[in-house]
Image (cartoon, grey):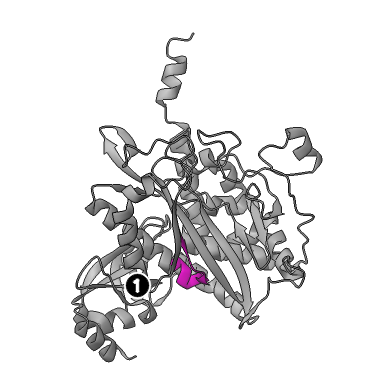
Amino acid sequence: MNPAALGESLHAAGVHTLLVQFTDLRGVAKGKLVPLHQLGAVLRDGAGFAGPSIEGSGLPRSGPRSEFWARGDASTVQPLPWWPGVARIVGDGFVDGRPFDACPRQVLRRARARLAERGWRLECGIEPEFFLLRRDGDRWLPADDADRLDKPSYDLKSLPRQAGFLHALREVLEACGTTVLQTDHEDAWGQYEINFAHAEALASADRLMLFKLAAHALAEARGMVLSMMPKPFADQPGSGMHWHVSLWDGAHNLFAGSDGALSALGRAFVAGVLAHAPALAAIGAPTVNSYKRLRVGRSRSGTSWAPVFVAHGANNRTALVRTLPDRFEWRLPDAAANPYLVSATLIAAGLDGIDRGLDPGPGIDDDLFAMADTERAARGLARLPRSLEDAADALQADAAITQALGDELGAELLRLHRAESEDWAGHVSGWERARYAAAF
């Protein structure tokens, strides 16, 4: 559809304004409102933004590279049901007339191009977990005061109390073309999960950002805060964002083996993901808070459900990679992860495993949370990085993953990770004061 025809169809649908939206390095949706009559300019040149005002852009304050342009992708235009008269269009980053290497969506486009050279595409089904919270002074609490079960997973008392929000969220997502498979109460107070049908990697990332836009708006309208913080409460599980991953050649799933297990290609892809797990932690677990989720220990409900050890296993939810007959579930990413960078680096790791013919070794059926340290050591199971600083070190040392990110974005990501780690190291917490103030 040409711009004029697209504009006419949007106008006929009651749209008068475009939300030109892009995603910054942190995985946060950014953008501006543009009148519909500027659609042609948005598709041709994009909407302009001051580059250095964008988190992680690394752009200068003057000169031709100081302007960031979000060039609209016509295939993403979608009226927003919760915002009458407004349609979102997702923008790709351009600087000085060229694709901007440090735009997360452009990073994923480059990764997709590597797959396309082989006639392949990556399909992703994303499962974001999130909290519905309210603020009480300096405290953050579950929005539902009655949500207090010791084992709250699949709770059918709390779930109906949030039915208005959850139904509204599903309705607007499905009105925007996203198939919602299921919604449930998760294993922490005030925590929920929504699962989407799988889609090509770029479309899936775009839909995840649409979910965040919709969920934030609908929660705020009900006096709640949608939180994608990885670990809001120390004694309860954190929020993951699991990736269900499959590789396709046309209509053929290349991960589907003939024996009910992953194919040899799928196993090599998994081996690459395991081999690059430390560096991938800097992408999938991108905050200092993320590493409070990725730890051994019990929670109020019994377990954390977050992976700690680099392993794979058939339908094993305690492993980093849970393998299934025609796909695998990557359990590392948390709710704060940037979906474009997660998929782009996942592709890089998987292709490296395929190209080098890596073998992931035997799968582990045992409960890794219950396994003794001595047994894990005997099996040679490595542990994920314990901190954002350790993950940043692993990323800097991993050529395959840094190459996928590109020089500009990789440098900015490492700079932000190291700055956050330094800020955290210099922070004095209430726990420290309670423990040490009068101790010596």
Name the residue at 34% across, 56% down. Answer: 166
Q: Is residue 45 left or right of residue 350?
A: left
Tell me which corner region of the image, top left, top right, bottom left or bottom right, holds residue 79: bottom left
Give the camera-side residue of 76 and 140: 140
Tell me which corner region of the image, top left, top right, bottom left or bottom right, holds residue 112: bottom right
Residue 354 lies, in percent from the top left, at 72, 68
Asked if 111 appears above or below 306 in the picture, the reply is below
Q: Which residue is mark 1?
A: 176
Note whether residue 407 is visible. Answer: no
Q: Residues within 10 Å of mark 1 (few under 14, many from 20)?
A: some
Asked if 22 appears above or below 1 in the picture, the reply is above
Residue 121 lies, in percent from the top left, at 58, 76
Magenta residues span: 195-205
Name the residue at 25% across, 32% down. Answer: 137
Query: Quadrant location of the N terminus?
Result: bottom left
Name the residue at 63% across, 43% down. Answer: 308
Name the residue at 37% across, 39% down. Answer: 147
Give the camera-side residue of 223 and 51: 223
Residue 267 lies, in percent from the top left, at 73, 64
Asked if 186 appears above or below 70 in the picture, the reply is above
Farthest residue toward the right? 378
Give the camera-side residue of 322 and 61: 322
Residue 402 lies, in percent from the top left, at 59, 59
Note whether residue 173 is visible. Answer: yes
Tell me which corner region of the image, top left, top right, bottom left or bottom right, holds residue 233: top left
Q: How many marks?
A: 1
The amino acid sitting under disc 1 is Cys
Q: Secondary structure at mark 1?
A: loop
